[in-house]
Image: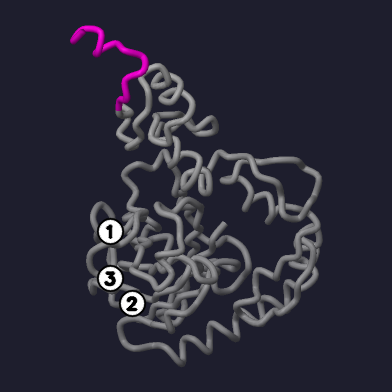
Amino acid sequence: MAEHKKECPLQEVKCSYKCGKMLQRQYLTSHIETECPCRKVDCWCCHITGEYQFIEGEHKEQCPKLPISCLNKCGVGSLPREDMETHRVEFPLEMVQCEYHNVGCGERMMHKDLEFHKKEKMEKHLSLTSSQLTTWSLNFMTGKTVVKSDDQVCPVILCIADIHEEKSILCSYSAFYSHDKGYKMCLRVYPAGNGSGKDTHLSAYLYFMKGPHDDELTWPLRGKFEVKLLNQISDCEHHSWTMIYDDSATDVPAGRITGGDIGRGWGRPQFISNEDLHKVTLTCQYLKDNCIFFQVSKL
């Protein structure tokens, strides 16, 4: 009888996945394979393994590989969630704002008309940029850094003054957000260099900060940011670097800040050489009146 009890199909047993359910042994296999919310399954999109209730619930809401439809109903069909933001920006009928909106151009147009607008309004954009840079230089020079309020949203332009003091350790802690109600970040710049760039290069890093919207955001962050050192005399020859936060960047600090107000930074200790930073040509000048300007954009 003892041996039979171990195999009896009518005996009540507990699910081996610890979901708490009691059922007859004859139904256990079927329950484990098709019904148990704690059974292990693979996401058919990104192939990570987890409990069924997690994969079909929380994970499904944020899986970067899950195909979703474009909200613009453009007819392109489904795309992986991680590609949708880029698609929406590149969609020809998507309404976008001018890239120079942060310096005063308030025009909006379809994405397909953006390049024509930039060419047609080049002189206007240069004038607006020059005026804004001059204003920021006058209003925000503090002897070490130029700091604006921390409610800015990408793209943002940040100014750092007194770059002629090459031996000083200068940093910009200007805070901004990746998007409206987005990730809080800041740019730190070391004109005298840091790490492998010390005394030979200007170093630049992006840092995540503890923000008011962290509970509503998905972690770790996934996306692309462009850090651009602006040419102050022409809308060309800007010096830039694209930072990509994705699954391949395993050592990149992109997680939520759990201790303190700021996390670890990620960037380029050799962002630009001192020689290139100080060079002046007919069309390019990064350092002007002892100031440099950075633009940070979310791509």
Q: Is residue 253 visible?
A: yes
Is the residue marked by circle 2 packed among few (<14), some (14-19), or many (20+) residues within 10 Å?
Answer: some
Callout 2 secondary element: loop
**Badge 3 is on which residue?**
261
Q: Which numbered dot is residue 164? A: 2
- Label 2 vs 1, first from the N-terminus: 2
The span shown in magenta is 1-13
**Badge 1 is on which residue?**
264
Disc 2 to disc 3, how far (Cα)? 30 Å
**Residue placed most toward the observer, 116 or 16:** 16
Query: Is 7 one of the magenta-colored residues?
Result: yes
Q: Is residue 274 visible?
A: no
Of the two numbered discs 2 and 1 in the rendering, the one whose residue sits closer to the viewer? 1
Disc 3 to disc 1, how far (Cα)? 11 Å
Q: Amino acid at mark 1?
A: Arg
Quadrant where the C terminus is found in the figure: bottom right
